Image (cartoon, rainbow, N blue to C red):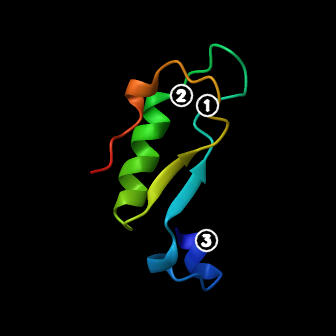
Amino acid sequence: MSGFKRHGIDLSKVIFVVAGVGTSVKPGNHVNPLIVETFSKLILKYNSYLKVHSGDYLENLEILPEYN
């Protein structure tokens, strides 16, 4: 988020943050739960949401946060 601020990006306009969460595009794809939790908690403080990079074929979808 400090990088956004350094570049003059208004954080209130950031809706999604794309993050590498240990995935690759292949069958049997799994996210890293620790990375998902860390990124999600950080960006929710700024009212933004996590967009998983390389989210095809995910087999552990239950790890991803639900946004209500």
Seen from this angle, which residue lies furthest top? 28
**In the rendered image, which residue does mark 3 sit on?**
3
Sequence-wise, the earlier of marks 2 and 3 is: 3
Secondary element type, mark 2: loop
Q: What amino acid does circle 1 point to?
A: Gly
| Residue 44 coordinates in the image, percent (x, y) | 36, 58
Q: Residue at x 62, y 20 (%)?
A: 29
Q: What amino acid does circle 2 point to?
A: Val
Secondary element type, mark 1: loop
Q: Is residue 24 toward the left or the right of residue 10 in the image? A: right
**In the rendered image, which residue does mark 1 sit on?**
22
Q: CA distance from mark 2 to mark 3?
A: 24 Å
* Vertical position of residue 33 compared to residue 12: above or below: above
* Vertical position of residue 41 compared to residue 11: above or below: above
Q: What amino acid does circle 3 point to?
A: Gly
| Residue 31 coordinates in the image, percent (x, y) | 54, 28
* Vertical position of residue 2 compared to residue 44: above or below: below
Q: Residue at x 64, y 42 (%)?
A: 53
Q: CA distance from mark 1 to mark 3?
A: 22 Å
**In the rendered image, which residue does mark 2 sit on?**
31
Q: Residue at x 51, y 28 (%)?
A: 32
Secondary element type, mark 3: helix
Sequence-wise, the earlier of marks 1 and 3 is: 3
Question: Do the CB atoms of the residues marked 2 and 1 lie less than 8 Å apart?
Answer: yes
Q: CA distance from mark 2 to mark 1?
A: 5 Å
